[in-house]
Amino acid sequence: MNIYPIFTRRKSTVCHVGTLTIGGEAPIRVQTMANTSTNDIDASVEQAKRCAYAGAELLRYTTQGMREVESVAQIHAQLRSEGITLPLVADIHFRSDVADAAAAVVEKVRINPGNYANRPDEIDERFTRLLTICRTHHTALRIGVNHGSLSKRMMDQYGDTPEGMVASCMEFLRIAVREHFSDIVLSVKSSNTRVMVETVRLLVKTMDAEGMAFPLHLGVTEAGEGEDGRIKSAVGIGALLADGIGDTVRISLSEEPEAEVPVAQALIRWFTDPLSPRYHDLTLSVDNNTVRFADNESDWSLFQLHAAAECGRLLWDNHATEIILSNPHFTDEQLTRLASDILQAARVRMYKTEFISCPGCGRTMFNLQKTVADIKRELTDTIGNSGLKIAVMGCIVNGPGEMADADYGYVGAGVDRISLYRGKQCVLKNIPQEEAVEQLLKLIEQDKQHE
Ligand code: SF4
């Protein structure tokens, strides 16, 4: 079956974020998240400028408490005084009072329904209050649900499933609709690309059934870094963009935030630019359980992104299990390895150790990028292509929940302190960071002996 790609964007309502619009006829926006300490104003302002110059259109800051609200307000004021108009987003977990305060100082607030409040009456009261504050200050909201951080009530009712994530989001949306508040963007993310795509599709279907069309932010959480992080992000986000779904995108990499921007831009261009090779040079087909992707671009990084963006969806939707890639500029070995990487990113076949790592943010108390590189190197040397999933997460607050189905977790527990997890169980608490990689290796080796 030959496929002739088209791009028809889902019609969504418009969300105003300061002077920026998301959804409707607006271009698909690119966003990223700071990894500085929010309280380090100078470093945060400098990083924000680098992100703005790279082309980021929104920048998010972790905002743990009232001190961070003050800091975000200072960062905001400093940027505006220098003529930088980049809208800022406060990322809030656990504290509805902090969300209320942040809504008065930044253009957008992200809340996580999984930890905003538990009982329906509490949600109604707190969220209605937040909507009133947002309306007063012309502040937008993101309802951001993450796989692995649903509320206990949702977990008890649905488990950690796409249905639970969608139900959690819809509970908030129904209140927003009742209150006639429309400056809302939604995200439902997972580090498992298949879960992420299934959940977003289910959310769109559920909203359609209730006459809602809120815009969607797309992202694969804890995608990792380097080629693997880019391929995994492209598999999940590409599948939805190909459906026409998505109004804003973040590529979550364990790298500097400005490095995420060109990846998102390239992915958006592939689908939305009428001059894109997608609509001129591409050969795409599915036959005999095999997805075939051929094009003639000569840039390896772009070829990786484009192939990943197209193949994941075709694998899932056609129950295919193989990929054949063609491009005269690259060797058979390169193309075969990329096909295997895409199959793994789509969770169709595991052939090597998978490293899940969060991008880090103001909650991270250690050098995440160096640690991810060290762990990858050490573990690849010792356990090789084990097929295990190893998570490296910056903080104990969100890390254990969001490392999803990892077999082992290395989680920041405080300044230079690490806790190690086997699945969801913490097995070593608050150990010094310099011992942690060795202890993780020991744990994996011990478990192998007991298999
Ligand atoms: S897991 Fe923690 S440190 Fe990592 S991005 Fe999420 S909140 Fe930040």
Image: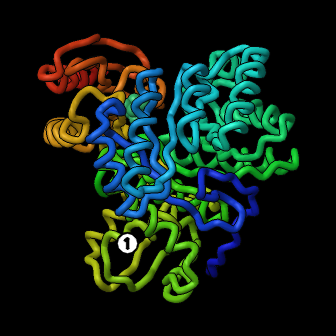
- At x 23%, y 41%, the residue is 369
The one of 195 and 293 positioned closer to us in this rendering: 195
What amino acid type should be assigned to the residue bearing mark 1? Leu
Badge 1 residue CB within 8 Å of ligand 1: no
Q: Which image quadrant: the N terminus? A: bottom right
Image location (x, y in percent) of residue 349: 44, 50
Find residue 414 and report its image quarter: top left
Which residue is disc 1 drawn over?
Answer: 302
- Mark 1: which secondary structure? helix
Find residue 135 and report its image quarter: top right
**Quadrant of the image where one finds ligand 1:** top left
Q: Viewed as shown, does residue 308 lie left or right of 228?
A: right
Question: Crowding at label 1, few (<14), some or many (≥20) Cα neighbours within 10 Å?
Answer: some
- At x 20%, y 21%, the residue is 416
Q: Which image quadrant: the C terminus? A: top left
Image location (x, y in percent) of residue 402: 47, 30
In this view, 378 is above or below 270: above
Find residue 181 and report its image quarter: top right
The one of 341 and 77 positioned closer to us in this rendering: 77
Here the colouring is rainbow
